[in-house]
Amino acid sequence: MKITIVVGAFFPVPPIRGGAVEKAWFLLAQEFVRRGHEVIMISRAIPQFHREETLDGIKHIRVRGFDSPASLVWLKILDLIYSVRAMMRLRRGDIVVTNTFWLPILLRGSKRGQIYVHVARYPKWQMRFYSGVARLQTPSNAVGRAVEAEAPQLKHKIKVIPYPCPRPNDVPPSITQRDKIILFVGRVHSEKGVHLLVDAFANLPAEISKDWTLSIVGPAEEDLGGGGERYLAELKQAADRAKKVFFHGPVFDLDSLQRHFYAARLFVYPSLAERGESFGLAPLEAMAHGCAVMVSSLECFTDFISAGETGFVFDHRLNNPADALRKRLESVMTDQTMLERVAENGYRRSADYSVDRVANQFLHDFSSLIEARS
């Protein structure tokens, strides 16, 4: 098959600045090439990368993109400009995958291949404009249901295929071999609930928290999706009460990130993004690295986290969510046997999301669309 993957305007590929969508499709592109398919990736150009090059069999084409703006209206305008630039570089093929807002509309009636829309976030009224595409693929059942609710006439075009999650080559160390570290990895932004985690940790009873530290890994910079310097300063001020909270900044190098995962006993992802969190790749990555995982009660996490079995859940919708998180932390930090059991169950569950298995699902779906059209 000839597969073209067009990712968004704001992050480059290879994903040296992060981005769940970019990470996922870069992994899948490598697997597609390994299986003999022809893959072109179109992504944001940055000075570190050539505008055109072939790496590990993937043909990369890069067009000028943008830093992510705060304004949603301006974001859509920049996406339109980028999508037009990307469209000008498209070649004829079998499948065109994209998560951009405008490209599926611009390609309506195009001969460049079957339009495969990756719906990376909850829909915001745009699904009605995608009636001409071949597929609306969502990473979670929660987003799939939201797409169907917005455009029930397109139900037959919806397909749920998760993000891939690569597992380390070696077996992760057991919980008992790790330091007593609680870890967060993700954008340091209020919608990720990082302030809840810092507040909850700072208010733990001293007899419980005395041997534990909290590590926060991720960008606070606004151009990388963070909450900015003011939010980071507020977090650090709140963390002063605990004395054992460490802010490591963004870590995109996979080996360095693995060291953080392997050091931690408990990974906490207290996201508050009711209509922004579409899958939760970071908790799944933590599970693949043998961490016990705790998340908020967002619907998207239920695809791979069963409360008390493959992970822990706290109710972020209560009047005092930070206190709810603190109480949940207290209950699990003092039960190492339970931590170890949940971590082992989570590690086994993460195998269902291997790059190989997820690539199988995509390639089977691509083939079905091509066969239906012929």
Image (cartoon, rainbow, N blue to C red):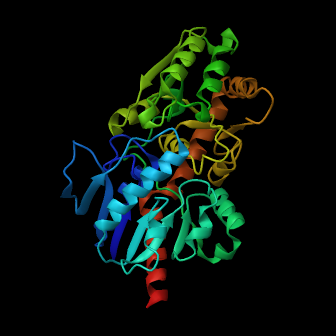
Query: Residue 158, image x and y in percent?
Result: 60, 70
Query: Residue 257, image x and y in percent?
Result: 39, 35
Vertical comparison of 34 with 214: above or below: below
Report the front residue among 3 and 262: 3
Vertical comparison of 141 with 186: above or below: below
Q: Is residue 165 visible?
A: no
Question: Which residue is situated farthest in the right direction here?
Answer: 319
* Residue at left offset 43%, top offset 57%: 80
Which quadrant of the rendered structure holds the C terminus? bottom left
Judge from the rendering whether residue 106 lies leftward or rightward of residue 349; answer left or right: left
Report the front residue among 311 and 44: 44
Judge from the rendering whether residue 310 lies leftward or rightward of residue 321; answer left or right: left
Judge from the rendering whether residue 30 lies leftward or rightward of residue 264; answer left or right: left
* Residue at left offset 45%, top offset 80%: 109
Report the front residue among 221 and 297: 221
Vertical comparison of 184 with 284: above or below: above
Q: Quadrant of residue 335?
A: top right
State the count of labels.
Answer: 0
Q: Is residue 312 visible?
A: yes
Query: Residue 322, image x and y in percent?
Result: 71, 25
* Residue at left offset 50%, top offset 34%: 187
Which quadrant of the rendered structure holds the N terminus? bottom left
Query: Residue 60, image x and y in percent?
Result: 25, 59
Vertical comparison of 240 with 130: above or below: above
Q: Quadrant of residue 254?
A: top left
* Residue at left offset 57%, top offset 14%: 239
Question: Which residue is situated farthest in the bottom direction here?
Answer: 374
